[in-house]
Every structure is written in C-alpha cells, then in structure tokens.
Amino acid sequence: MANCIKIDTHTHILPKHVPDFAKKFGYEGFVMLHHHDDDTADMKMGEKFFRRIEANSWNPEIRKEEYAENHTQYQVICTVPVMFAYFSKPKHGLEVAKFLNDDILNTVDKFPKNYIGLGTLPLQDIEHSLEELHRIASLGMHGIQIGSNINDENLSEPKFNPLWEACEKLNMAVMIHPWNMMGFDSIRKYWLPWLVGMPAETARAAASMIFSGVFDRYPKLRVMFSHAGGSLIPTIGRLEHGHRCRPDLVALDNPNSPRDYFGKFWVDSITHDPDLLHYIIRQIGSKRIVLGSDYPFPLGDLKIGRYIEQMGLPTTDVENIFQNAPLEWLGMELKEL
Ligand SMILES: [Zn+2]
C-alpha cells in the first residue's frame, strides 16, 4: 500500500458568478454562467450554449466532500480553458485574468489544506501577462495554466521567451492544457475536437517547445503537459525518426533528438488506459508523472487515480505519481502542506 497523500494536479474550477464581460466591454466571446434552480448552470457565450455544469464546478465545499470520498487530500485548481479570453483586447484580458485568479486565490485562502492554485494570464499581451504573473506569484500561487496555442500561435514563438524566463525565475510551474483545437470546425461530429483534437493539440505544444529549444534555454522551467502529454509520448518514435531523416525540416532550431527531453517535463496521469500508463512510466519514469483527473468534467478520471492503485505497480511508482512528482512539479515540499 502506498503511504502518501494524493495531490490531484489537474482540476478545473469556476467562480459561481461571472460578470457580464461582453456587456461591460462591448463585444462577444466571454463566457457567462446562467444558474438554474436545481443547482446546475449553463456556460454560454452570448446565446451560444457551451456546457451544462453542476455545483462541483464552483462550490469548494462540495468538491472537498467528493475528494474525501476518493481519499485525495489536495486539488490543484485552475480555470476552464474556455475562460482564457486570449481573443480579447489586452486590458480586458488582464481584467478577466485578475477576476479568475482572485477567485482561485480566495478559495485557496479559505481552504489551504485542500486547494493549491494555478493562475491564468492574458497571453495575447506579454507585458500584461508578466505583470499578472508577478502579482499572483507574490500572492502565493504556485503556477499557471496556459493554452496549447495562443490565438493559433505556437508556444515555440520567441515572443513567449519572457514568459518562460519569468516562470523559471519566480519558481512558477506551468501546466499546458489543450484548447482551441486545430481543425475544430471540420471535426465537430462525434466530439472529435475533444477525443482526437486535444491529444494532437498537446503534442503540438510539446513538440514545438522541444524543437525550438525552450527546455535548453530554460533548464529549470517546470512544465506539465495535460492528458499524459496527449499523443506526444506514444508517437515519440515518429518524432525522433522525422528529426533524423529530415533535419532540414525538423532540426531548424535544435540539433538534439526529441527523445533527449524525456525526463525534462512532466505529464499527468489521465490516460484512461493502464497499458498506456505502464508505457509512459517506462518512457519517462514515474517521477515525471503527476496524478491528474480533469475533475469535475465527465471526460476526466473521476475516481481520481483509483486505476493506478489497481495496476500492481511498485509502491514507489504510486507514491511518485500521487505525491512526490506533484510536489516536485509544483516546486513545493511536503512540510509546506
Ligand atoms: Zn482539463
């Protein structure tokens, strides 16, 4: 039996009430919550319905109870990617980010033994992002969640270098979450943006960062890729072979093989497949895999890693995934909890 706490590094939370930013700023695209009497709410952009959610999306007390049932002590909370508002004017993006971050900071403040916060940044503008990064770091946040692309720009773009540099300097962990999935409009049927697009998006983010040399320029940067790294790790042979056979296309900015970067980033444990988790442990080691769930959404691992306890793994692997790797990624020590 593993003798450790469980830290779920990938959970989403929303403020119960979201201002009408569309009305305030004078243009659409911002998400609002429309609450119903049965303690559910609809996330809508203007008249466009996005998703119906339940009270465990905003109520920290209910979340605490559900986590206690799953023997999990800590939830790392971040916003839902549809809230990023990267499309908005920079000053509006900053206002939205501050509002979301303050709500998370407030929850962590009220329940320091249950919640650890990740912030969001208005990455359409790097200066505003750095300002907000410094603010939330000074208020006790341990990291940020950012999208797999920023308004269709890859994370390999040099304009993001100041972000990586600041995260390294401020000891802020970075979670990269798929969103704004490439090809979205042409693959809408069968929920393909979520089932096929998301793993590809995460691989896009990871591969672009590796090939551009981000991990060499910022060796102390701690990045975690969601959903077990998407399709990155299962396709590493292809990436490696492509790098070798067509360096004229791939090795433009970095001569090193992509496989050399295994061990230099973290991924979460959301595979829905024990065989795949076994494979990822063999590839990058359990010290680089953090427990994640995507709670409270139905596509997540809502038993919060129970399948990991049933895989017959060595205890050290389970303890790494549940506790040690999350702490190392967050830059925290057990005694701080
Ligand atoms: Zn998620």
Image (cartoon, grey):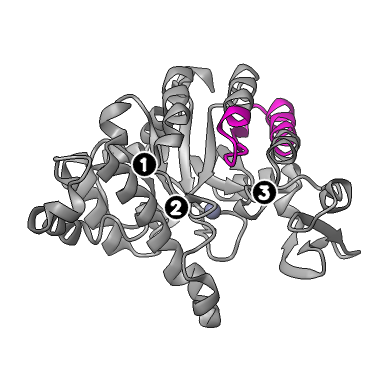
Q: Is residue 241 left or right of residue 19?
A: left
Mark 2 vs 1: CB contact within 8 A: yes
Q: Is residue 326 left or right of residue 100?
A: left
For residue 305, the mark is 2
**Which region of the structure is painted magenta?**
100-129
Residue 310 image point, x, y percent? 35, 57
Quadrant for residue 68, please give it.
Answer: top right
For residue 321, the mark is 1
Mark in the foreground, 2 or 3: 3
Mark 2 vs 3: CB contact within 8 A: no
As measured in the structure, the alpha-carbon distance from the residue carrying label 2 to the one carrying label 1 is 9 Å
Q: Is residue 273 left or right of residue 211?
A: right
Residue at x-position 60% and y-position 60% = 297
Within 10 Å of disc 1 (Cα), the crowding (few <14, some 14-19, many 20+) is: many
| Quadrant of the image containing the C terminus | top right
Label 3 SS: loop
Residue at x-position 14% and y-position 45% = 257
Depth order, front residue of 92/78: 92
Residue at x-position 38% and y-position 28% = 328
Q: Does the numbered disc 2 mark a residue whose Cβ is under 8 Å from ligand 1?
A: no
Mark in the foreground, 3 or 1: 3
Quadrant for residue 234, please give it.
Answer: bottom left
Going by the numbered disc 3, the residue's amino acid type is Ala
Within 10 Å of disc 2 (Cα), the crowding (few <14, some 14-19, many 20+) is: many
The residue wearing badge 3 is 85
Residue reaching furthest bottom? 189
Name the N-terminal-most of marks 2 and 3. 3
As measured in the structure, the alpha-carbon distance from the residue carrying label 3 to the one carrying label 1 is 32 Å
Depth order, front residue of 160/143: 160
